[in-house]
Image: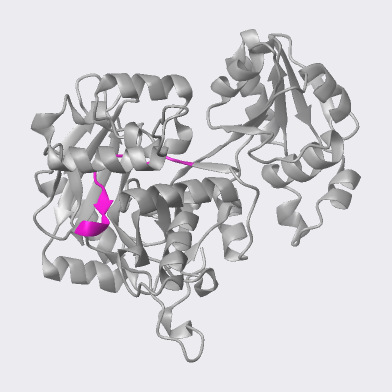
Amino acid sequence: MPILPSSQAPAGCSPRELVLAPFRGVRYAEDRVSGLAEVTSPPYDVIAADIENQLIASDPHNIVRLILPRHPAGQPGSPYEDAAADLAAWRSDGILVPDPELALYVYEQVSVDADGRPDPAGVLQRGLIGGVNLLPPSAGIVQPHENVSPGVVAGRRQLMEATQANLEPVFLLYEGGNGAATTLVDRVASSRVPLMEARTRDGLRHRLWAITAENELAAIAADLAPRSALIADGHHRYAAYQQLRAREEARGAGAGPWDFGLALLVDSAAYPPRVGAIHRVVEGLKPEAAARLARSAFQVRELPGGTADVPAALDALAAAAGQGVAFLLAGCGRVYLLTSPDPGLVRATIVEHPPELWQRLPAAVLQDLLFARIWGIEDDDRSVRAVHDAASAIDAADQEPCGTAVICSPMSADQVYRVAGLGRRVPRKSTSFGPKPRTGLVMRLFAEG
């Protein structure tokens, strides 16, 4: 991933550096809740309705009440005002308490077995949580790779305005090369007692440490300054950070907490990310019709197990994706495998440069060829639902009145870095990086500095 040293800042501008600022984190008081696993959650955009209900039922103070507030229909006020009121009440009641000092937080996620022992074949990710400085996209310091939906951005910004808080971090990657920041992260995680620890149902153990010593914070700052970062997860939240900052500037507010946004920063050299795909559910489009239309541009084969054998279908997709762009169409009990998109149609439809990159991107073929050219559908959040889990997408398409789930193969990490390095963006909801940070372990409230 390209790095823009501060010495290359545009003429007449102050140096532009990657800054991860310490902040006074606000965390759950463990003696006031049923458990940290019960009050935290996955990021807001991967929580299905049934999981949301489970989280709400798990503890009256679950963070989902703040990040996905529900407002009674016909009642005055708004969901954002409800979230702000709940946040204020939880602080007043001592459910949420600020840490005593400004800090950067070391955050570790590791797969563990039933006895709590780390699984060597599982996940291990460590990084730093802090306030990332918000610079214009032209600075190239924090690089997006996906487009966003304006309505979602506005909603996240309204939530931040109402709560005056960053409730969940964006997920950033940088090429640290095991520099000073990564060395310190590993030393802290290996030798110090954590502030908190939680084990969640997905088999991960989450631990958090605070770095407050001035010399350690200075070493991290010096190491990060010349680097750039890639937005792995949280494009809508990051765009909401930028939108909130612009609104504050427009009203003459001057410098303030809105100049930073909460972020988890992970060294991708030390902890390579897992890149998955995000799938689509198109209601009102029957799989038989979708497959018939797709035959004009793809080789189409119906899989014998249908939706009764989702693992076999996913295995078939994985095998086909190793040879090129491929998709599954599923729903109404049937599954079709799409392979070998017609090269002439791909060239005519996907005109972005460089063609050897864009014409091999599953997200580009999905949006420009399959959706726009063949089906005449716009891939937006009004008509197409994005679903992170393939089995959940297929199940949704199987429900009456059934529709079509489009199961995608993932981009490679190299493709993501190349897109970002070119200053370009793939369609919304194209990638799912993991493991994602747990929401609610530590929050950034503007009033806490």
Task: Give the residue drawn at x 22%, y 53%.
Answer: 105
Task: Give the residue drawn at x 19%, y 48%.
Answer: 26
Q: What kind of colouring is applied to the model shown?
A: one colour
Quarter holding the C terminus? bottom left
Image position of 317 (left or right of 190): right
Q: Kindly indicate the quadrant of the structure image that contains residue 65.
A: top left
Q: Is the magenta stretch mostly helix, strand or loop?
A: loop
Residue 117 visible from this viewpoint: yes
Image position of 140 (left or right of 367): left
Tell me which segment is drawn in magenta.
433-447
Is 304 above or below relative to 360?
above
Residue 438 visible from this viewpoint: no
Task: Give the residue drawn at x 8%, y 55%.
Answer: 100
Task: Give the residue drawn at x 69%, y 11%.
Answer: 306
Is 62 above or below relative to 355?
above
Q: Viewer-proximal residue, 72 or 267?
A: 72
Q: Where is residue 279 in the image (x, y as percent from the top left)?
A: 61, 32
Residue 435 lies in the magenta-colored region: yes
In the picture as drawn, the residue positioned furthest to the bottom comes out as 12
Residue 195 lies in the magenta-colored region: no
Is 276 above or below relative to 114?
below
Q: How many labels sit on residues?
A: 0
Q: Position of residue 47 (x, y in %)?
A: 44, 30
Q: Position of residue 206 (x, y in %)?
A: 25, 37
Q: Position of residue 111 (x, y in %)?
A: 30, 31
Image position of 4 (left or right of 24): right
